[in-house]
Image: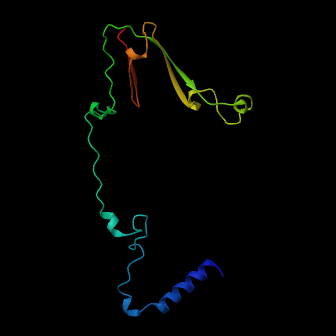
Amino acid sequence: MDLGSFAAEFQALSKLIKDPEDADNTPAPESVSRPTPGTIGPKELLNVKVAAPKARHDAKEIWREDELEDAVEDDYDDGRQVPSYEFLYKQAVDTADNFLGMSGKDPSSTCCEDLVLRVELPEAAGAAELDLDVKDTYLKLSSPH
């Protein structure tokens, strides 16, 4: 059976099944819409209102000052000496990591578990005179010296 004879037989069958009174009300095949992803599902979802995005003050601005949670004012010079400091990255490794590389860790800072800050304060007499403020995004260590 070829495709042409199948189409002819299908049209003949549809004429037998079709009600002659509905012949005038049949829409043209071009006017019938096909289902799309937008027509699937409940119709009440089509009436959802989406809020417009908030307008920014400057198009090149990434964030505003009022959006910063932990803004630290540390650019002022109060005459005290700035100590030398060093950030150290630490990771937990064992011999399998060190010699065989089995865990996939490398010496980069992305594979480190701990961040250590070493500050040299030669004039400090003890921890009692230091003021330490630790937040999620910054650390501030103050001394009278």
Please state if 85 lies on the left or on the right of 75 as rendered. right
Quadrant assignment for the N terminus: bottom right
State the residue at coordinates (37%, 92%).
21
Q: Position of residue 49 (x, y in %)?
A: 28, 58
Would you place residue 141 above or below residue 60 in this image? above
State the residue at coordinates (39%, 29%).
135
Please state if 28 lies on the left or on the right of 107 as rendered. left
Please state if 132 lies on the left or on the right of 6 as rendered. left
Would you place residue 49 above or below residue 31 in this image? above
Give the number of callouts.
0
Q: Position of residue 57 (x, y in %)?
A: 25, 34
Q: Give the quarter of the image for residue 66.
A: top left
User: Which of these two is toward me, 5 or 115?
Assistant: 115
Q: Position of residue 19 (x, y in %)?
A: 42, 92
Would you place residue 70 above or below residue 48 in this image? above
Q: Give the quarter of the image for residue 132.
A: top left
Report the colour scheme: rainbow
Q: Position of residue 68 (x, y in %)?
A: 32, 32
State the residue at coordinates (40%, 71%).
33
Would you place residue 131 above or below residue 28 in this image? above
Please state if 97 lies on the left or on the right of 50 as rendered. right
Quadrant assignment for the C terminus: top left
State the residue at coordinates (29%, 63%).
47
- Residue sitting farthest toward the right: 100
